[in-house]
Amino acid sequence: MNVLSVNRALTLLLLLALVAAPLFLGWMEVDFWLAVMTEILIWGLFASSANLLFGQVGLLSFGQALYFGFGMYGVAIGIDRFGLGLWPAMGLGVAASLGMAAVAGLVAVRLTWHYFAIITVVFSLIFYFLALRLKPITGGDDGLSFSAPPILDWGSLRLTLSDDATQYWFVLLIVVLAFALQARLRASALGRAFAAVREGERKASLLGIDVLRVRWIAFVIAGGLAGLAGALFALFGRYASATHMYYTVSGEAVVWTVLGGAGTLLGPAIGAALLILVREELSTVWEHYPLAVGALTIAVVVFAPRGIAGGWNLMLARVLGR
Amino acid sequence: MNVLELEGVSRQFGGLRAVDGVTLSIGTGITALIGPNGAGKTTLFNLMSGLLPVSSGRIRFRGQDITGLPAHRRAKLGMARTLQIKQVFAGLTVLENTWIAARQRHRPLDPFRRASDDRATRAAAEAALETMGLEAMAGRQAGSLAYGDIALLEIAMALATQPALLLLDEPVCGMSPSETERTVARIRAVSATTDVVIVEHDMDVVFGLADRVVVLAEGRVLADGPPAVIAREPAVREAYLGEDEEAA
């Protein structure tokens, strides 16, 4: 037995638990948790976008909310203005975020570390203020509301987001597919090129790796993942607004990633789940709950610098005696 | 045809001409580049491998003008280089290090196929490890290796790209005498199939290994010839070997 097989088994168990969750929560008569879990799935996917850049390629982005926002507005505008169905609207949202990332990436990937972080913030601030100003397109401060088209409408078979369990399973399906895609990416030659660029860009280029191109590809994929999360979030809230493009939203993705374990596949989602649960539980009884979040994050960074998932892997390796 | 040709290559840093009009043809076998500290050896290596752009002059590699090409394009054309401060992908396994190097010749950015299914690249990566005698360490994390083994791994990575020209920047620096001996033997074996340029301070290594010695001083070529001739050259003894005499 090794770390990988234990983690695989646990991931499978987690997947089964997630699939069965609506039934269990219904039986326990605590249905409101289903909405929280749906939100956790979406934010977990969003965090994985920051993790792809930071954990895999070594680029710390504080601007992923920009692509999240493009995904949101793509869906909202597609449905509200163009009368698109659910899937084409999602396609529009993801395409918009991919396109934006492709353009912003051309500039951003030439920079590293704090310069890279700053340029990503600058891009997202520009579009945040633009979104506030361009009221006819984005709804400005009010945002855009819409009613969600059905997921599936085949005669007698009609699935809609208005059923909480259906909505949850729909989000779960998309998020699981997005994580499966990332797992495959990690195992591919491109995934290894990501790792090479992270571990030493000069060495990578001396071996024939086009570092800027590899970074750009990662930047675009990460933008697409953030856009997909934004598209799901818009459908979940039937709403798009500029507030979710603000850089503090990007910062949350970074905190979730670092807390959960940068570079691991599921760490960012674990971090997102933990901090959203803390928020849900604590915010009702203590308005200064972010203090607890900050303390928790600092504790993890100090005592488990590889995050929860990284710490878990170390512990598991020790217990299994390698 | 000479594998690498430099024609009036210069590099200026502000007012300092670190490399000053170097014209040099690198042919077959092992060429050693020696000279006192600050002579411009590493800068010249950076110009050859494309880590630095030239200020003036032209560079041709296997007949092709590569003066304006970045490092990764030169690597793809068959030029490999190790660094003076040894650098490997510390967080990855030893085999993954040479795997990445070997993969760069065939669809290096394929996002779909599993890397573990690519048997040809794995075989090439393992062969490179064997050449440097590292096969027993394939599964270890590269960052956990001893310094000498990291230096050997760096050479193995360079070899895994199947280069036509191998630039080695102080390959035995920091190695124990027995490691040095092992490494010298391996470099000699590699030079049977690959042209090698080596920057080295250890004169026993240089004169034991090189077919030709080029002496740099203040960014210029001071002398160029077979090791036996260079060792007797008065200007070389004064500029470089003389340091040792004073010390002794």
Image: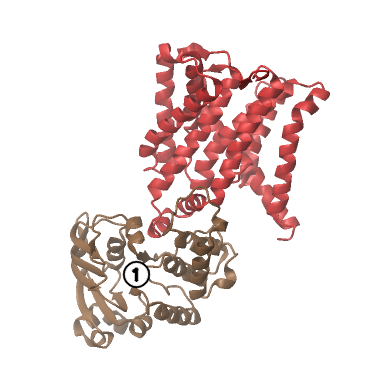
Chain colours: A red, B brown
Q: Does residue A148 lie above or below A307 as drawn? A: above
Regarding mark 1 in the picture, which secondary structure is present there? Answer: loop
Q: Position of residue B182 (x, y in %)?
A: 48, 81
Give the residue type at disc 1: Ala
Residue A294 visible in the current orientation: no
Q: Which residue is mark 1?
A: B164
Which residue shows up at 44% across the image and 22% down it?
A: A128
Q: Position of residue B148 (x, y in %)?
A: 50, 72
Q: Position of residue A240 (x, y in %)?
A: 52, 18
Which residue is most to the front?
A: A155
Which residue shows up at 42% across the image and 12% down it?
A: A135
* Quadrant in the picture for the N terminus of chain A: bottom right
Q: Nearer the viewer, residue A280 or A143?
A: A143
Which residue shows up at 73% across the image and 51% down it?
A: A6
Q: Position of residue A139 (x, y in %)?
A: 46, 12
Q: Which quadrant holds residue A18?
A: top right
Q: Nearer the viewer, residue B74 or B177?
A: B74
Q: Is residue B90 left or right of residue A278?
A: left
Which residue shows up at 42% across the image and 34% down it?
A: A101
Which chain is disc 1 placed on? B
Q: Does residue A82 lie above or below B42 as drawn? A: above
Q: How many marks?
A: 1
Mark 1, residues whose alpha carbon is within 10 Å: few (<14), some, or many (≥20)?
some
Q: Is residue A261 left or right of residue A92?
A: right
